[in-house]
Amino acid sequence: MSCKSFAFGVSLACLLAAAPALAQPGGTGTLAQRIGHYNPAKVMHAPAVHDGAGSMDFGPILGANSLSTNLIFMHRGTINPHSGIGQHFHNHCEEMFVILDGGDAQFTINGRTSTLKTPAGAPDQMGHSHGIYNPNDTPIQWLNINVGVSKTYDTFNLGDDRVGAPLDKVPQFINFHIDPALMRPAPATLGAQGAVTYRRLLDPTVFFTTWSYFDDISIPAGASITPVVTPAMSTAYYVFKGAGTVTVNGETQPIKAGDAVPVDLGQSSSFKQTGAEPLELLAVGVAKDMAAKEALIDAPRPRPTGGRGGRGPARGR
């Protein structure tokens, strides 16, 4: 469905396409130009997103030009009190809402709704529907990631805001909770120096596109990830907490919470923590093609991390 065909309930991507002031970072230029930054003062206000209740405030931090693989966008913003994103389908792409901070949110996948304890997320696989609602009196902090079969975004709204939806005690869909207690020593493939910890929140079997993993990485004081090159895998990093520096192909830039760093196929990347708290990264892996993703699925598995959301064996890079 194109932007022009909407009678109401404009999609996230269509709203941003109509706002040139919120131009998305591209895949060309210096590293400083490629890194996306979340600035609450420069986001747009959007009511009734996908026919949802209330409103939200958000903007892009990475766009379709950020990686040569099929990352379509990474958005960051807030969902206002008693507001949400209405239930809608994606048939050519996969999307995931992550609530980073604030009250617990009501996630819907395929018409089944459960409250997930923040910070948490749930992927919407290709050909399925999803939505989210903030039942709290305060805003919740929201991250959205979209990966497609191609660079084309699609959506089909259901006209369902999910307000007052019945809640399942046990979620009937794939989900994860970000929990420091479940982190484990980083695998050798990360090139960690120091007590870096890691958890694979979602492995490649979860997704139908070339989306290959969603990882949580914590780099404590004095620690780092040494240069790593992955010719068949690109990664979009979101800085969840803390501050540090990133080096991509020899260019170094400071990074802080709210930044997004694209690392394309074959690029060398390393991270170093600075500041008072650990540098925590959320990493979105997107493979060059399905063959590269299948190779990751078939690779030897490190020890499982355990815990809900990544209950099975975690797979290394």
Image (cartoon, helix red, strand yellow):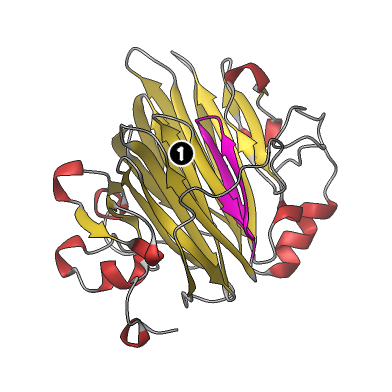
Image side of residue 42 versus residue 313, left or right: left
Residue marked by disc 1: 99
Q: How many marks?
A: 1
Examine the structure image and report whether residue 119 is included in the region drawn in magenta. Answer: yes
| Magenta region, main secondary structure | strand
Depicted 201 relative to depicted 19: above or below: above
Q: Nearer the viewer, residue 151 or 124?
A: 124
Q: Residues within 10 Å of mark 1 (few under 14, many from 20)?
A: many
Residue 23 falls left or right of residue 133:
left
Left or right: residue 236 versus residue 77 is right
Residue at figure coordinates x 65%, y 71% from the top left: 127
Q: Residue at x 57, y 37 (%)?
A: 115
Q: Residue at x 36, y 36 (%)?
A: 140
Q: Position of residue 289 (x, y in %)?
A: 66, 69
The residues colored magenta run: 108-125
Residue 256 located within the stretch drawn in magenta: no
Type of residue at label 1?
Ile
* Residue 128 picture location, percent across and down: 64, 66
Element class at badge 1? strand
Viewer-nearest residue: 52 or 275: 52
Task: Say whether residue 69 is visible.
Answer: no
Residue in front for this viewpoint, 296 or 157: 157
